[in-house]
Amino acid sequence: MIRIENHLGNIEVNDNYFSDLIGHTVTSCFGVSGMANCGASQGLRAFFFRQRNYIDQGVRVKSVGNELILDLHIFVTYGVNIAAIVDSITNKVRYTVERATSLAVKKINVYVDGIKEN
């Protein structure tokens, strides 16, 4: 949960909101074929429950003060320029998060965990 204090009071933003917002933004980018698990808890949950559509799959959000650090784990489509895809994801996610929440995005780490044929 991310808490923001301003002159009007306290605002609390749920982590699921960020994960859902970022996940939809990333998967809508050209060349992204899916999200990968980013951690042991997501991997165990996927193994035991055999479900593929988690809200937080492939997204980890950390807050440092009023700034966010985002870790994204993705699969890309075979034959596309990975550097261009990562640049596109970084720009689109930064714009979407800052516009939706008015929080600054300090850093976005994009990890390409694999390549899939389409």
Image (cartoon, rainbow, N blue to C red):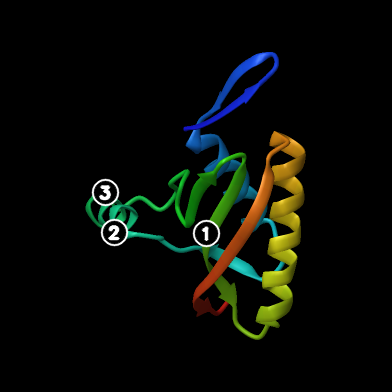
Query: Considering the numbered disc 1 on the image, is that residue within a helix, a strand or a loop?
Result: strand
Between 82 and 6, which is closer to the camera in this rendering? 6
Q: Residue furthest top?
A: 8
x%, y% of residue 50? Answer: 30, 53
Closer to the camera: disc 2 or disc 1? 1
Q: CA separation, marks 2 and 1? A: 14 Å
Type of amino acid at the residue the image marks with label 3: Phe
Sequence order check, earlier mark of 1 and 3: 3
Type of amino acid at the residue the image marks with label 2: Ala
Residue beneath label 3, please? 49
Numbered circle sitting on residue 71: 1
Whether residue 94 sits left or right of residue 112 in the image: it is: right
x%, y% of residue 84? Answer: 74, 76
Q: CA separation, marks 1 and 3? A: 24 Å
Numbered circle sitting on residue 40: 2
Sequence order check, earlier mark of 2 and 1: 2
Type of amino acid at the residue the image marks with label 1: Asp
Check the image and report above or below for 41 versus 21. Answer: below
Residue count near mark 1 (Cα–Cα under 10 Å), binned few <14, some 14–19, many ≥20: some
Check the image and report above or below for 3 versus 45. Answer: above
Between 63 and 24, which is closer to the camera in this rendering? 63
Task: Tell me where residue 109 sits by quadrant.
Answer: bottom right
Identify the residue at horizontal 54%, vertical 46% (top origin).
Answer: 64
